[in-house]
Image: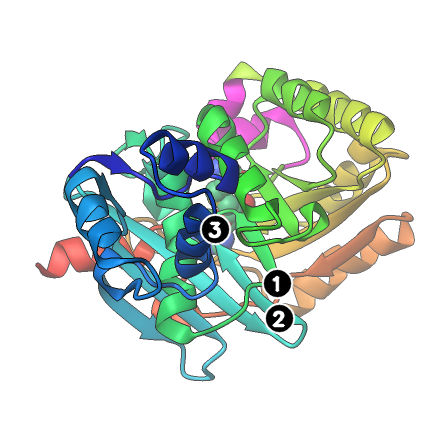
Amino acid sequence: MGLDIWGKSLKELEEYITLNNFPKFRAKQIHDYLYHRCIFTFDEMKQLPKNMREWLKENASIYIPEVINSIQSNDGNTTKILFKLKDGSLAETVCMHHKYGNSICVSTQIGCAMGCIFCASTRNGLERNLTFGEMLSQVYAFKKLKNISVHSIVLMGAGEPLTNYENCLKFIKLCNDSSILNISYRNITLSTCGIVPQIYRLEKENLPITLAISLHAPNDKIRNEILPSSKHFKIEDVIRASKHYFENTGRRITFEYILIKGINAAPKHAVELAKLIGNLNCHINLIPVNGTEHIQLFAPSKKEIFEFQQILEKMGKSATVRRQMGNEIQAACGQLKRRYLENR
Ligand code: SAH
């Protein structure tokens, strides 16, 4: 087995290779195989001398999880992969094929501790954090399977990224690394349910990524109902942290707001939301809830959604309705995995 070299920066790989008495340029060759040609076995790295390949097989490993299922939406714009990791855990990754390029939605944990009522990933609580290497391999499995280039990354799959902070940060840096994915920080979005102290911590990293905050409600009462973990943080404190983040990074915040009929989607909620946000420079992403099997939640009608958006716009807020992609393949958080487990 040996050292897992997956997710090592070029510099780290060079150190490892030279320490073991191989020339430094070999590290660059291996790096190119892994991250530019998606070749994940030493045997296929034909540019390396045979003795080096044999040595690597004895002393190093490349860990890429097994893809056990992949499905594509009818329109071909969304693909979802289910992975089996070393310990048997299952993780989901979604790729959305947009006009401007491919966007990959990465899971950051197995399960989730946050307990949001609409989300299938959190039904069995948190199993474990994903490592930065496991996050990177979600992206590369897609690159290999589909032979695609990746335009943007969203940390918006299963899990709460800000409770797996170090791994997520390292993963974000690997995405940006010019010798790995070379994705601009501006094209990386981290979505959080609003862990206030971690928002301040992230701000200090000074990375020009986009921060998306799952607000989902205009007040604490509704927020506590649909997002139980929000009991630890007052909605006002989430807004204050968002303001602070914007003022110190210059990066406009995105608020995600799931629209659930009968809960948070009435005109009065739109008014309350606009007032809550005040003059903060942000964008509001309205997301009609995707039905899940475990709980009866419904999206409002098209007309009601339009009205909600219009109220926000009239009150000077920038708001759009998220295009629903991959509904029929259960692209919303955790739904494919639950299906798989239930049918097994
Ligand atoms: N924990 C992070 C990231 C994972 S959830 C967070 O809370 O932001 C990311 C997003 O998945 C949520 O904001 C929501 O937009 C979406 N999501 C989860 N379940 C959904 C469902 N049933 N319908 C629509 N969107 C859903």
Q: Amino acid at mark 1?
A: His
Q: Residue furthest bottom?
A: 75
Q: Left or right: where does residue 65 sit relative to residue 93?
A: left
Above/below status of 95 relative to 263: below
Q: Does label 2 point to a residue whose CB lies under 8 Å from ligand 1?
A: no
Above/below status of 103 relative to 153: below
Task: Residue 244: name its quadrant.
Answer: top right
Expressed as whole percent of the image width and height from the top left, the position of residue 77 reads 50, 77
Which quadrant holds the C terminus? bottom left
* Residue nearest the viewer, comparing 61 with 294: 61
Q: Secondary structure at mark 1?
A: loop
Residue at x 37% of width, y 51% of height: 137
Range drawn in magenta: 217-231
Q: Amino acid at mark 3?
A: Lys
Q: Secondary structure at mark 2?
A: strand
Which quadrant holds the N terminus? top left
Q: Which residue is mark 3?
A: 28
Expressed as whole percent of the image width and height from the top left, the position of residue 52 reads 25, 50
Q: Which residue is mark 1?
A: 151
Q: Which residue is mark 2?
A: 101
Residue at x 86% of width, y 27% of height: 247
Above/below status of 163 relative to 254: above
Q: Residues within 10 Å of mark 1 (few under 14, many from 20)?
A: some
Tag 1 or tag 2, which sits nearer the N-term? 2
* Residue nearest the viewer, comparing 180 with 124: 180
Give the Cα separation between the discs numbered 3 and 1: 23 Å
Above/below status of 84 relative to 47: above
Tag 2 or tag 3, which sits nearer the N-term? 3
Q: Residues within 10 Å of mark 3 (few under 14, many from 20)?
A: some
Is residue 91 visible to the viewer in this orientation of the structure? yes
